[in-house]
Amino acid sequence: MNTLLRNFIVLGCLGGSVSAAPFLAIGDNAELFLTGTAGISYNDNIFLADSGPGKESDEIVNFTPGINLEFGKESLVKGTLSLSESLSTYLDHSEMNSQLTTFDFKAAYSTEKSSLSADASYTQYGQNVFSTNGSTVSHNVASVGLNGEHSISPKTSFGTGVNFTRTEYTSSGSTGDKNFGVPFNVFYAITPKVDLSGGLSYNRSETDNGLSYDDYYYNVGARGEFTPKLSGNLTVGFSDRNGSGAGAQSTSGVSFHSGLSYAYSEKTSFTLNADKGFSNSSTGGTTQKNTAFTLGATNDLTTKWKVYANLAYRIIEYVGAGRTDNYVQGSVGASYVINSNVSLNGSVSHSENASDAAIVPSPEFTNNIVSLSVSARY
């Protein structure tokens, strides 16, 4: 830990000594910013081992430079484009070092009656897994989407779109997939601030080992400002999954999706996200039933200090395999704004996975991470 603190102090001094540079203006409606995060963390179980000789700790130094482009401030089309490169260095386990790219693009067009949004992203992941010789599960996720909504009367509108996601594993032993989705929803305003909805979402997925699934989500829901302090969206309904190919499961059940925020006071707010549905497992492309709840809280102690806490609980049922995992993660953190360009951040997180699977190596583990970082945006 002494090495951890010493290295972070060096990083913090470097971040704090950077002099403010003007942003690059591109025409009248676009601005280019340089972004960067430098930090160090202590991880007490880098291989996510249950116990024994496989449980090892390390300190990881991370540097993430990037750029962020904001455009369309004075026009009907607005958007952002960001690109960053995350370089992670393990001080004792250099075989775990990684260099990961993240690209994200979002654009939106809005008029009095219609809105249209487009997005595209590409993210490289290096997910830590149990290993006695040092390895990560490397995979890339690329996605594109186009979604819109149009008002057909003062109270009624409809929305639809197309979305595509490709998950590709570069490490052997894992199964990627392709997903193509088409949502359709009708909205009816029961008050000036609340809409009721009814819809059907279709998703076609194909795994790299030859399995395919057709998913239908029939749902009703609501969105908007439900009270002066409570706002968000939610849907609940029935999901029907039809699988084809050797080992593909067909199943159905109740599903829901929600994102709610509650403004307790001017300084304190809470969020609650809840999801239940089906997905494809990376181990063989079989069906997973996922149920997840995430509760978050933030408080602005002062104009400089902000604290937060998050608690997540996820149940993963491997359909047809007789296995259920229960994953819990909690974290607390704080950020301190040095000036409009630089901030300091610190967090502590604890996670654990419990499983009834009788397999070796065991998927059960506990993991604690302490992180300190400095972020800059110019």
Image: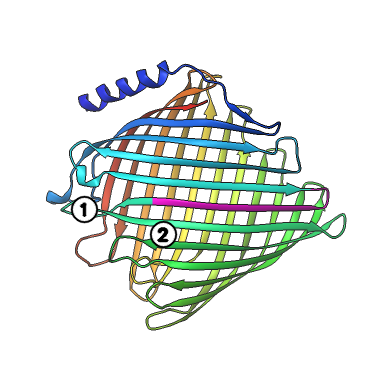
Q: Is residue 279 visible?
A: no
Among the 4 quarters of the image, the one containing residue 75: top right
**Front residue of this view, candidates 133 and 242:** 133
**Front residue of this view, candidates 282 and 346:** 282
> Would you say residue 123 sits in the magenta stretch?
yes
Crowd band around label 1 with a 10 angstrom C-alpha radius: few (<14), some (14–19), many (20+): many
Relative horizontal placement of residue 60, taking residue 278 as reference (left or right): left
**Front residue of this view, candidates 128 and 125:** 125
What amino acid is at disc 2? Answer: Ile
Query: Where are the magenta residues, as a range?
Result: 111-124
* Residue appearing at x 12%, y 49% in the figure: 53
* Residue appearing at x 46%, y 73% in the figure: 206
Mark 1–mark 2 CB contact (< 8 Å): no
Vertical relation: 198 (above or below) 338: below
Residue at disc 1, secondary structure: loop
Q: Position of residue 117 (x, y in %)?
A: 67, 52
Q: CA distance from mark 1 to mark 2?
A: 19 Å
Q: Residue furthest front?
A: 27
Residue that numbered label 2 is attached to: 315
Q: Position of residue 269 (x, y in %)?
A: 58, 35
Vertical relation: 37 (above or below) 115: above
Q: Position of residue 369 (x, y in %)?
A: 31, 38
What amino acid is at disc 1? Answer: Asp
**Front residue of this view, candidates 48 and 260:** 48
> In the rendering, which numbered label is found on residue 68?
none
> Would you say residue 377 sits in the magenta stretch?
no
Crowd band around label 2 with a 10 angstrom C-alpha radius: few (<14), some (14–19), many (20+): many
Between discs 1 and 2, the one toward the N terminus: 1
Q: Main secondary structure of the magenta part?
A: strand
